[in-house]
Image (cartoon, rainbow, N blue to C red):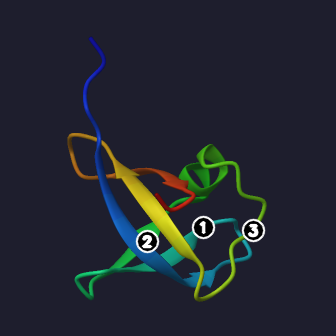
């Protein structure tokens, strides 16, 4: 059985030239999402103000930035 991953809603604060992004979680905390997580969600780029869903692994690292649910 696959391990369940934690998700949370956020708003894109900035999309960086290296493909990574900074997002603002709904609880007001800024989180950095690596380029690999952005690419895992199928994005070419993100724009400030865009709503997304963050997927985290068991250690809390952002593994994917997906379309909002």
Q: Tell me the element at label 3.
A: loop
Rounded to the nearest angstrom, the CA distance separating label 2 from label 3 is 15 Å
Q: Is residue 53 left or right of residue 4?
A: right
- Residue that appears at 60% across and 57% down: 38
Q: Is residue 34 left or right of residue 4?
A: right
Q: Position of residue 63 (x, y in %)?
A: 44, 47
Q: Disc 3 vs disc 1: which is toward the camera?
A: 3
Q: Are marks 2 and 3 in contact (CB under 8 Å)?
A: no
Lower sequence index among marks 2 and 3: 2
Please say if 69 is above or below 27: above
- Residue that appears at 60% across and 79% down: 50
Q: Position of residue 18 (x, y in %)?
A: 70, 68
Which residue in the structure is indicated by mark 3? 45
Please say if 55 is above or below 14: above
- Residue that appears at 25% across and 25% down: 3
Name the disc covering residue 32, or none. Answer: 2
Q: Disc 2 vs disc 3: which is toward the camera?
A: 3
Lower sequence index among marks 1 and 2: 1
Q: Position of residue 2 (x, y in %)?
A: 30, 18
CA neighbours of label 1 inside 10 A, class few (<14), some (14 to 19), many (20+): some
Q: Are marks 1 and 2 in contact (CB under 8 Å)?
A: yes
Q: Position of residue 13 (x, y in %)?
A: 53, 87
Which residue in the structure is indicated by mark 1? 20
Name the disc covering residue 61, or none. Answer: none
């Amino acid at each position: 059985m696959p391990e369940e991953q934690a998700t949370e809603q956020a708003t894109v604060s900035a999309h960086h030239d290296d493909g990574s992004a900074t997002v603002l979680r709904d609880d007001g905390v800024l989180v950095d999402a690596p380029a690999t997580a952005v690419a895992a969600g199928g994005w070419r780029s993100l724009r400030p103000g865009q709503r997304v869903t963050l997927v985290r692994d068991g250690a809390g690292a952002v593994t994917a930035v997906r379309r909002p649910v």
